[in-house]
Image: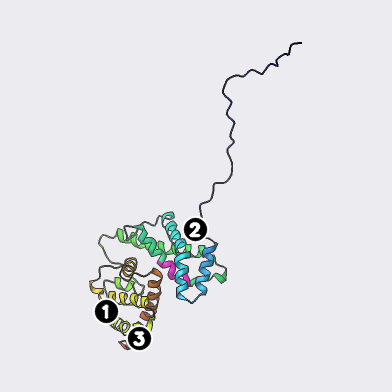
Amino acid sequence: MLNEKKSEPATTGSLTPEPIIKKKRGRKPFKKRYFTEDTDLAIKEYLSTSNQNEKDDIFRTRIYYPFYKLAENLIHTFKFYYTEVDDLEDLKHEVICFLLEKLDYFKPEKGSKAFSYFSIVGKNYLILYNNNNYKKKKATAPILAADEDDGVLRQLGRDNRKKDIKDFIDYFTEYVDKNMFTMFKKEQDRKVCDAINILFKRRENLEIFNKKALYIYIREITDVDTPVITKVTKVLKKLYKKLYTEYTEIGYVKI
């Protein structure tokens, strides 16, 4: 018998049909978080240590970037674009400085979440900042807004200084000159203190009036990190209030 060939099924074409690829379903990937569990831990460690070098290192390496991204997101999310600056990077820096000043007020032991706390603090700061600048832009004439904060750097911006304030600042700068080495043991702290004191002495010819610009100016002439500047200004702010109380009571400052 002859071997019969088995018939092969006919093909409709020479090309193999392409397989059907099913699309994967699921959630879109989350964006990388910037305020993490390590940020919370870093803030706790920052608050628990009294060593300023440790504080500076923790802030620089583990807290600065989360604060930077938080400031960036707040500015763009809520459209805080009425600013005194042309570059929003300067505004971000100002927000970071403000958040750094508020670090010591945060109490993690009370169960507060760091992200929520600093989001609210940063947002409230930007609301006031934005509203004040919006009012300035609406004004028909450029008028320097009065600043009720007697902070060390903000005091430089007052245009209509009363004579007693002028006299007091003369006392203040003389006091700082004579007591700088007692107040600050580290050379970099004294460098910042001296720079701020020089600004006070030259206040009549100073063309920089806002805190952000002064921080940048001091940072450039001293070449130190922002946390060092903030630490020194806190000390000077307390001294300023103490000496001003003395000045109002007796009419002068005991150098």
Q: Which residue is mark 2?
A: 34
Kindly check if marks 1 and 3 are in contact, taking CB atoms under 8 A apart as contact. Answer: no
Q: Secondary structure at mark 1?
A: helix
Q: How many marks?
A: 3
Q: What residue type is disc 1 on?
A: Lys
Q: Quadrant of residue 22?
A: top right
Crowd rating for badge 1 (residues with CA inside 10 Å; few <14, some 14–19, many 20+): few
Q: What residue type is disc 2 on?
A: Tyr
Q: What residue is at 51 percent from the left and 54 percent from the top?
A: 32
Q: Which residue is mark 3?
A: 246
What's the distance in space between the residues labelled 1 and 3, CA to CA? Answer: 15 Å
Residue 154 drawn at (x, y percent): 33, 71
Magenta stretch: dominant secondary structure: helix
Q: Is residue 201 left or right of residue 99?
A: left
Q: Bounds of the magenta span?
A: 97-104
Kindly check if marks 2 and 1 are in contact, taking CB atoms under 8 A apart as contact. Answer: no
Sequence-earlier tag: 2 or 1: 2
Examine the structure image and report whether residue 223 is included in the region drawn in magenta.
no
Instruction: Tell me, for residue 20, which label it has, or none.
Output: none
Rendered position, 174 above or below 136: below
Instruction: Tell me, for residue 166, which label it has, or none.
Output: 1
Sequence-earlier tag: 3 or 2: 2
Q: What residue is at 32 percent from the left and 60 percent from the top?
A: 85
What's the distance in space between the residues labelled 3 and 2, CA to CA? Answer: 46 Å
Q: State the residue lying farthest toward the front.
A: 1
Examine the structure image and report whether residue 102 is included in the region drawn in magenta.
yes
Sequence-earlier tag: 1 or 3: 1
Quadrant in the picture for the N terminus: top right
Residue 27 drawn at (x, y percent): 57, 46
